[in-house]
Each structure stands twice: as structure tokens, then as C-alpha cells.
Amino acid sequence: MVDGPTGPASGPRVGGAWNVTATPFSSTCGSTGHEPFGMSVVQNGEILQFVVQVQGFGPVRYDGWVSRNGTFQVGQTTVYAARGLEDRSIVDGTFGASGRTLSGTEIETITDLRTGASCRIHWRWRGSR
């Protein structure tokens, strides 16, 4: 996927294919490990969409914005009905000045829709294209 008609004025153009590694640094959900994944970024001006393919489910879309200085925020809410789970995340981060690197943090909350029990994972993202 590529940039939309415009990038943010004087800001990085970040549309395209990305390689990202998410590393947990705290979790109440039990043991987790590094999670490398591919991601497509669609950009139209200051509007962003991250699209991550989740094996066995399909695309998960994070929607948000990017500022002129490269800071961004995106979020998603996905219900995995067959598993009875809701996954909700917010990612705050920064793209490098060239638009070829990113770093950020994700707060992911997983809720069991049957019981209401939830847990949280705090991830560190590092990415490049």
C-alpha cells in the first residue's frame, strides 16, 4: 500500500510496507515473547491506518493520525467471536524524520467477553521499511 494524495505538510511520508517487532516489557496476561510482524501503513495527509494480518483471523486495522513532527497515535478494537475475546490497543509513537523508522509503545487489553476478566500487555514497538 502507498501514501494517499498527500503526506502531512513538512512531515514524514510513511505509507508502505513495514517490518515491526513488538517486545513486551510488562504483562498481566502471562508469559509473552517477541512478536515480529509485517504491517501495511496507509497515509492520507495526517490520517493513518496500520493493517496487520493476524494468522487465523485476518486483517486488524489500527486507525489514527500522524503529526508534522512524526508523532502518531493509532488504536484498534477487535472482537474474536469464536474465542469470546475482545482485544483493544492504543499505540503511541514517533516516526523518524526520514519516515523509514518507527518506535512506540502499545497498551493492549484483552477481555474475556464471557466472564469480563481482563489482562494487559505493555509492548515496545520498533519498526523499519
Image (spheres, helix red, strand yellow):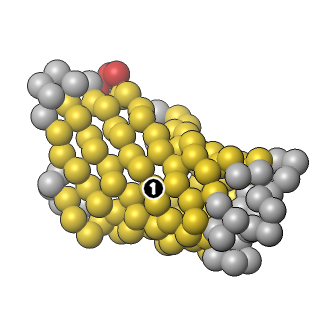
Farthest residue to the bottom: give it: 97
The residue shown at (22%, 50%) is: 120
Picture quadrant of residue 114: top left
Residue placed under numbered mark 1 in the picture: 91
Q: Position of residue 117 (x, y in %)?
A: 13, 34
Q: Give the percent coordinates (x, y) of residue 118.
A: 17, 39
Horizontal relation, residue 117 to residue 97: left or right: left
Relative vertical location of residue 31 with respect to residue 45 in this rendering, above or below: below
Task: Give the side of residue 11 with respect to residue 113, left or right.
Answer: right
Q: Residue at x 50, y 65 (%)?
A: 93
Callout 1 crowding tier (Cα within 10 Å): few <14, some 14–19, many ≥20: many
Q: Count how many numbered circles sit on residues in the image.
A: 1
Q: Amino acid at mark 1?
A: Val
In the rendered image, is residue 48 in sight?
yes
- Residue 13 falls in image quadrant: bottom right
Residue at the spot 20% in from the left edge and 31% down from the top edge: 112
> Do we see residue 36 in this rendering?
no
| x then y, percent, for residue 49 | 63, 46
Left or right position of 35 against 46: left
Q: Is residue 99 above or below residue 73?
A: below
Judge whether 23 appears above or below 2 on screen.
below
Work out whether 48 lies above or below 87.
below
The quadrant the C terminus occupies is bottom right
Q: Position of residue 30 (x, y in %)?
A: 15, 55
Residue in the picture at 40% in, 64% down: 105
- Element at badge 1? strand
Horizontal side of 69 relative to 7 (left or right) equals left
Name the residue nearer the viewer: 36 or 90. Answer: 90
Report which quarter residue 124 is drawn in: bottom left
